[in-house]
Each structure stands twice: as C-alpha cells, then as structure tokens.
Amino acid sequence: MAKIVSTHSFRGGTGKSNTTANLAVMIARAGHRVGIVDTDIQSPGIHLIFRLNEREVTRSLNDYLWGRCRVEEAAYDVTDSAIGALSGVGKRPQLYLIPSSLNTGEIARILREGYDVGKLNDGFRELVRRLELDYLFIDTHPGVNEETLLSIAVSDVLILILRPDHQDFQGTSVTVELARRLQVPQMYLVLNKIPPTMDRRSLREQVESAYGAQVVGMLPLNAEMASLGSHNLFCNRHPDHPFSQELMCVAERIIA
Amino acid sequence: MVGGPTQLSPQSVSVQLIDSSTGALMQTWEFDGQDRITVGRAGEQDIRVGDQYVSRLHAELQCGPDGWILIAQGRNGVHIDGQRIDRARLADRTVFRLGPNGPALCFRYGQAVDALATIAEELAPQIEFRIDQAKCASEVAEIIDGGYFRDLETLAAQLREQRSEDSRRG
C-alpha cells in the first residue's frame, strides 16, 4: 500500500519545501515510485527546486481542482533531471511533481473562491493509483487551514518541521495535538536550521519531551543551502554534507 | 560592555564563530596570555562548538615564536579556503572550518571588542523552550469545535478504509 507523507510546518521559512524535495529524491533513488503534490497553492515554490519554470508548467494542481484536467495530467516526470541514470537499482526509480499554478491570477482565484477540498483528496487517491506510486509526498501550506488539515488527516506519516525558535515551538504544539486527534499513524519531528552553537542533545530532549514525539532529523543551519537559493536539489549538489547525511536518516525512517 | 579599539598585548587573541548562512558573528571567545587554545565538542575545550561533526578535540591553536599556528586534530580535518590542512600559520582574520562543511571560525589578533561581538555573545542560543499549554489548548479547542474538524475526523477514518480497499484491489 502506498504511503502518504505530509510535510508541514506551523510557520513559513522552516525549509519545508527543500526538505520535502530532497526526501522525495532520496526515497525515489532507493528504487521507489514517488510523487510530490504542492498543495501550498497560495505560495507555490517547490517547482523551483526541480527547476520547472512557468513556461514548462502548462497544467497544474489548480487545473485539476477547477475540473480542467485529470490530476495525473498535471504530473511532471522529473526523474531524469532529479535522479538521472542509476545502475544497480532493481526497480527503476520514478519521481513526479504536481505543481501548483505559478500564475498570479490562478492563485488569486483560489484565495477568492476557495475550492472543493474533497476533490483534493480524490486527487491524492487517483495519483497513487494512476501513477502506481509507492510514496506520495504532500507539501502543505504553513499554518492550519482546511486543506492542511485534510492533508494531515489522510497521511500515513506526518513530518513536522520546526526551527529552534519560540514561535515555531509554540505553534507546532497545536499541530501536534490536532494530528493526534486525527489519529495520524506516524508523526515525526524534524528540527531544521540548528545553529552550530546550540547544544543539540539538550534541544532534542526538550523537543521530544514537550511533544511526546520522536525527533528523527536535526538539520544544521548552513551556508551551502542558502547559496543554492532553492534553485537546485541540495542532496545532489552536496551528497556528503551533514545536512544530506542527516536527511538520509529521515528518509530511512519513512521507508522503514 | 561596548568600547572602542583596545591596545593589547601581542598574545591577546580572539576567535569568532561565524553563522555560515549569513556570515554574521555569533559568538566570540577572547584569550589573553594563553599560549594554547583547544577547539572541539568536548566540554573541557577552550572553544566548545556543539556540532555533531566536530570532534571532541578538533584543533589546537598554539602560540610560537613566529606567531600563532593552527594544528588539526579531528577526524574531519580543518579546512582553509576549501583546502584541508594539517598545520597552518594564522594571520589576522584567517577563517577556518571544522570539517569540510562544518562551523566556520575566524581568528583575530587582539580582542574583538565591538557592539556586534558583545551582543552576539549575549545571544549565544542556549535557549530553554517552553510551551504555553493554556494557549495551545485554547487554540486547539477553537479549531476542533468547528463542524469542519468533526467531519474531518469521520472522513479521516473513512479515507483510510478506502485506501486500504484500493490497495487490496491492487
């Protein structure tokens, strides 16, 4: 059965899209069929990491939600650009991205009129079925709204990303509680942008004790990620970097 | 305390931890009259950097007749200008990394007394995080009391059942 993995953060700027994109690539590279849906319709961004530009994106999640296409028609095969040719992997990896529209008019329409959240769920199921996915990643909009709650509700795995920051810490407590009420089977915490001076052990203990959930990744604040400017896949550019190595541990937890 | 440039003895040096994403100064250690400075993750080092890729003793700075030198000790090495070094002479403002992508430190002759250094040191982030449980409970209650959330709880159970069925059908 395919696993639905939602990545969420209470606030923006936590590195959610970068984390999602890199995790998806790592899991696909291990020989799986993976899809990513950008449900951050108000502020789409993950397409940039896969270097999809506005001209290339002729169909998007928005088109599906407005009934203008089937959901799989908005899926872009980014396997070659993100993973390339692999030898020694039994099953051919496959990676699809379903971007949200980059058109400001489309974004404004969503904000103005809303959309049928139930149709979004139908879209998730269709994607899993039509693209024969092993994993479907949902990159959510920060904060709590209807589509975020739906994404959490349908998840098998919820990855909550937070920084060592008081506002992130407080806000995440609300999401953790909501996820518990929605009985998400697995909930993991990923701490991102940890400054080098911070006592990592104490931080992990504080977070795990506060939320009663496991921290599966502690990602260091680093200049290399900032230099990429969300315009490339970090794990491809810096495969041996501590950030990539730590993220690989998160990927292994999702696959386990 | 904030002050202007200070006249110092030759052996007065400082080492600054640089935020690798912004280049901002994060912490400063100052030494006066000390001829050996140790850098590493272990609590007993003069400069303690709590990063998992930093060795317990990662580097030593030694003052010799020709000035200060840096000697690498850690497993991940010390890098200057992208090159791994075993030993290097330290000039004022030499930046070295603990490991190829690890924390960056800047060596300074004299004590780096400026407003930024003082503020940065005070803000060295050994933070204690606390959750305001009452605020959290009130925000959660506001969300779950809505009809949408109640419907969603029911829907979530149905959806999981549907997906299991999809999977059984293949």
Image: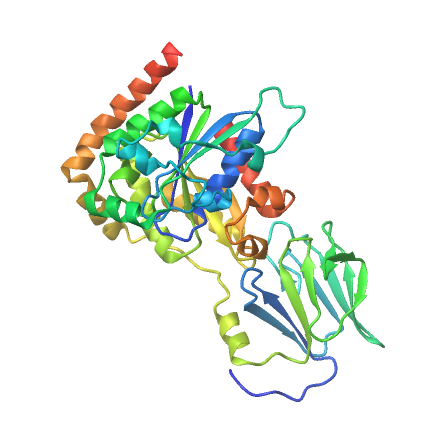
- Relative to A151, is B136 above or below? below
Could you tell me residue A121's position as x and y percent? 29, 29
Residue extending farthest to the right is: B65
Tell me what residue is drawn at x 15 percent, y 40 percent. Answer: B145
Tell me what residue is drawn at x 54 percent, y 64 percent. Answer: B22
Residue A190 makes an appearance in the image: no
Q: Which of B161 and A21 is in front in this view?
A: A21
Q: Which of A105 and B49 is in front in this view?
A: A105
Q: Which of A38 and B41 is in front in this view?
A: A38
Tell me what residue is drawn at x 59 percent, y 65 percent. Answer: B18
Tell me what residue is drawn at x 31 percent, y 47 percent. Answer: A42
Q: Which of A130 and B35 is in front in this view?
A: A130
Residue extending farthest to the top is: B169
Could you tell me residue B96's position as x and y percent? 70, 63
Residue A97 makes an appearance in the image: yes
- Relative to A91, is B46 above or below? below
The quadrant holding residue A158 is: top left
The quadrant holding residue B70 is: bottom right
Quarter of the figure that contains the N terminus of chain A: top left
Colour mode of the rendering: rainbow
Could you tell me residue A38's position as x and y percent? 38, 39
In the figure, is residue A239 to the left or right of A118? right
Could you tell me residue B132's position as x and y percent? 29, 54
